[in-house]
């Protein structure tokens, strides 16, 4: 079989899974005991299987099924064609207002849900799977398919969370030995463990959980415990402009950046105009190319946290990086309960971006389960860039099947990420807080 024929797609397999997630707190509520993810497999006529991963909530799965149906017979080299195919089969009437909704996506932490964002998040999983299959066929790592790596290791930041010791009674879920972290000493202890186990050299605290004074105290405790190491705070848009300015002034000279202190480009622009000296980062008000002109023209953000899932894949992440470089905007990478496939993809594209200005986010140390045969290992807070063909990961078929059975056995309660619903198990009166919360 010639190479071109071998690269044609023979089959596409979609496997939704539920993965264990600890009781991490955010302004919306608490993580559910299990989080949905979708594993995408693209099988070529040459017998090579490429893998990808994306969000697994029902709306993503429905759109992914539509896209999977039209891919057999296409080449894995035609990643640009994925977007055209998605527009045809996942657009228009297929993405109704009922699916899109008027609210925010992924527990309120990815900005407003739109039809475009849904399609791009789905396409990202297929693009990565195609690149993995192409790399395996040609004997090249994914980073080579993106133009080649400019670094051998990618730096990551320790992701700190306020958390409970366990999920609310009756919620189920896997138990761990981390214990609760609800005050500055608890956050510092959490940071010390992540340094001990993974060697991280920077820290990001998920805020918006407690009144700002308590979170300021936690950041100050981190600064005292880890002098000179970069610190970030992300309240997911929970604060007013005035509160954001107050926190920025209190933590000037302490924070590397303040991420999405207030919701919306207009509020971020107001904060930035005050010139507090603390750069503003976002993964909420700039999540599509259409949102870039307004945000950059207003000077609303100084750092964009890219995420190949909702930007539409690895090639479009590089396009974003080029735009940020052109406009002098800093670049880092966002994370959301990813498994080893997504982390591998993230690492490959990060290795090709010349001006990756800040260590990347990662939830990976919090994920106790995976679908790959060998977990990624951080050393000194860094992840080595694989030179193996494709992504450099292989599916653990037995584990994949077990996590899929968990999804099949679920009554539908956990197939949609809903941090507010999870919080209501502990507090039946809980409602998603209005923005601004403080």
Image (cartoon, grey):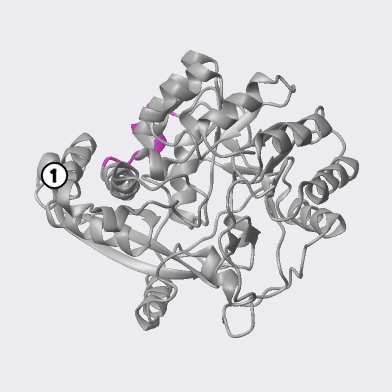
Taking the spot 37% from the left edge, 62% from the top edge, the residue there is 57
Q: Based on the displayed image, in which of its 4 quarters is residue 137 positioned?
A: top left
Segment tinted magenta in the rendering: 138-148
The percent position of residue 18, horizontal first and vertical second, equals 44, 70
12 vs 418, left or right, is left
Q: Based on the displayed image, in which of its 4 quarters is residue 77 positioned?
A: top left
Q: Residue furthest right?
A: 224
In magenta stretch: residue 146: yes
The percent position of residue 128, horizontal first and vertical second, equals 34, 45
Taking the spot 71% from the left edge, 34% from the top edge, the residue there is 242
Taking the spot 58% from the left edge, 31% from the top edge, the residue there is 267
Front one among 261 and 160: 261
Query: Total of numbered circles in the picture?
Result: 1
Compared with 18, 86 (above or below) is above
In magenta stretch: residue 427: no
The percent position of residue 431, horizontal first and vertical second, equals 57, 65
Compared with 227, 309 (above or below) is below
Q: Based on the displayed image, in which of its 4 quarters is residue 424 positioned?
A: bottom right
Taking the spot 29% from the left edge, 61% from the top edge, the residue there is 61
Residue that label 1 marks: 88
Compared with 389, 12 (above or below) is below
């Amino acid at each position: 079989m010639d190479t071109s024929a071998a690269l044609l797609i023979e089959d596409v397999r979609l496997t939704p899974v539920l993965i264990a997630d600890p009781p991490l707190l955010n302004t919306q509520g608490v993580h559910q005991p299990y989080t949905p993810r979708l594993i995408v497999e693209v099988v070529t006529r040459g017998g090579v299987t490429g893998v990808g991963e994306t969000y697994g909530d029902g709306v993503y799965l429905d759109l992914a099924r539509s896209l999977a149906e039209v891919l057999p017979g296409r080449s894995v080299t035609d990643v640009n064609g994925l977007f055209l195919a998605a527009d045809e089969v996942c657009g228009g009437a297929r993405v109704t207002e009922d699916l899109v909704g008027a609210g925010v996506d992924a527990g309120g932490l990815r900005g407003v849900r739109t039809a475009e964002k849904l399609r791009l998040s789905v396409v990202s999983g297929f693009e990565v799977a195609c690149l993995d299959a192409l790399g395996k066929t040609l004997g090249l790592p994914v980073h080579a398919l993106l133009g080649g790596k400019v670094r051998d290791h990618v730096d990551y930041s320790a992701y700190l969370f306020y958390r409970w010791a366990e999920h609310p009674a009756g919620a189920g879920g896997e138990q761990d030995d981390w214990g609760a972290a609800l005050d500055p000493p608890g956050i510092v202890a959490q940071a010390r463990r992540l340094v001990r186990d993974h060697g991280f050299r920077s820290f990001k605290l998920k805020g918006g959980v407690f009144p700002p004074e308590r979170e300021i105290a936690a950041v100050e405790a981190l600064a005292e415990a880890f002098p000179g190491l970069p610190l970030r705070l992300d309240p997911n848009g929970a604060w007013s402009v005035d509160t954001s300015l107050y926190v920025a002034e209190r933590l000037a000279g302490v924070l590397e950046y303040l991420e999405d202190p207030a919701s919306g480009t207009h509020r971020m622009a107001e904060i930035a105009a005050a010139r507090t000296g603390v750069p503003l980062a976002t993964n909420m008000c700039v999540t599509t190319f259409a949102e870039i002109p307004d945000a950059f023209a207003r000077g609303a953000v100084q750092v964009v946290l890219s995420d190949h899932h909702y930007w539409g894949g690895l090639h479009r992440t590089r396009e974003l990086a080029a735009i940020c470089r052109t406009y002098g905007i800093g670049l880092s990478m966002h994370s959301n309960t990813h498994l080893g496939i997504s982390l591998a993809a993230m690492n490959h594209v990060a290795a090709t971006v010349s001006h990756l200005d800040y260590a990347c986010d990662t939830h990976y140390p919090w994920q106790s389960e995976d679908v790959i045969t060998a977990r990624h290992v951080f050393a000194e807070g860094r992840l080595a860039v694989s030179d193996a063909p494709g992504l450099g990961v292989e599916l653990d078929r037995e584990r994949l099947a077990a996590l899929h059975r968990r999804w099949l056995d679920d009554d539908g309660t956990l197939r949609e990420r809903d941090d507010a619903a999870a919080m209501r198990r502990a507090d039946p009166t809980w409602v998603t807080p209005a923005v601004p919360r403080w």
